[in-house]
Image (cartoon, grey):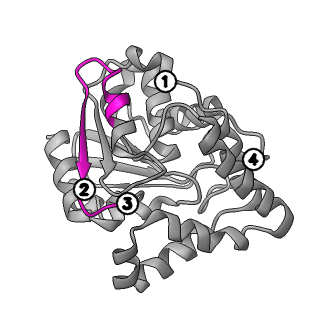
Amino acid sequence: MSNANHRIDGRGERWVTFVTGIANDLTMWDGQVPVLEKRFRVLRYDLRGHGGTPPNGNQYSIESLVRDLRTLLDEVQAGNTSIVGLGLGGAIAQAFAIQHPERVDKLMPCCCRARMVPDFAKLWYGLRETVQKNGLETIVEPTVQRWFSEDFKAAHPEVLEKIRRMIRGTTFDGYMGVTEAFLHLDVEQDLGKIKAPTLYVSGAEDKLGGPPELMQGLAAKVSGARHVSVPNAAHIANIQNPEGFNRVLGEFLK
């Protein structure tokens, strides 16, 4: 049985499942649910050790996170679903679609990667070391600063405050576990196995998490896939520009 904290909204026939990233919880998708719940059944959940889901140790892999998702889908009886994931959630979504092609209607990986590379890994080893030494609070500020563009941060202090609270809801084990999984991410060579209609979505101002040119390159490896960049958005594109993101999302899932 899955012990993942989850929510289902809407009454539609078709399912859409949202997958969160590192130090996120299911509230990150609050701005997307209203545009989908009339037509879909919308499933959101917290990763291990995030939000309301207990940690379950701290040695996770992409495989175990894919298994968590499969178990949850079985439990809520979502035979197949469209999957939208951001950051690590986008990596889990791609890995799930590679392993379980028959269960994915449409796939929308956002602001993400399919393989860890040395220069990006350096950042994560540094963050893990800081958390190990001084606890999670030490990475709250650097993380929230990295996720949004400068003008957005200046204009929306209330959003940043909400996001800080979300990051603080991550357990030590949860953070160490998912970052461990992320550091071993390596599904890029299997992207050709994805069968679902796929749209890669980047934030136009995302410099690090899943920059547009990198996402464009991933789309080229999936048969028939496209890439769209949301303007006025950095890494957490769905929160920084919900209107722009929702337009792309609604259009794709139609």
Q: CA distance from mark 2 to mark 4?
A: 33 Å
Q: Residues within 10 Å of mark 3 (few under 14, many from 20)?
A: many
Q: Is residue 77 left or right of residue 169?
A: left
Q: Which residues are magenta?
A: 216-233
Residue shown at 49% from the left, 32% from the top = 114
Task: From the image, state whether disc 1 or disc 4 is nearer to you.
Answer: 1
- Where is 69 relative to 122, above or below? above
Q: Is residue 136 left or right of residue 153?
A: right
Q: Residues within 10 Å of mark 2 (few under 14, many from 20)?
A: many
- Where is 162 relative to 235, above or below? below
First reached walking from the N terminus: tag 3 or tag 4? 4
Task: From the image, state whether disc 3 or disc 2 is nearer to you.
Answer: 3
First reached walking from the N terminus: tag 3 or tag 2? 3
Q: Does residue 7 appear anywhere in the picture?
A: yes
Q: Nearer the viewer, residue 91 or 40?
A: 91
Name the quarter where the N terminus is drawn: top right
**Tag 3 secondary structure:** loop
Give the residue number, with chain letter if any, for mark 3. 234
Quadrant assignment, res 175: bottom right
User: Which label number is shown at residue 56?
Assistant: 4
Give the residue number, with chain letter if any, for mark 2. 245
User: Which label number is shown at residue 188?
Assistant: 1
Q: CA distance from mark 1 to mark 4?
A: 27 Å
Q: Position of residue 21 (x, y in %)?
A: 52, 51
Amino acid found under the numbered disc labelled 2: Phe
**Tag 1 secondary structure:** helix
Q: CA distance from mark 3 to mark 4?
A: 31 Å
Is the Cβ of the residue at disc 1 closer than 8 Å to that at disc 4? Answer: no
Residue shown at 29% from the left, 47% from the top = 41
Counting labels gives: 4
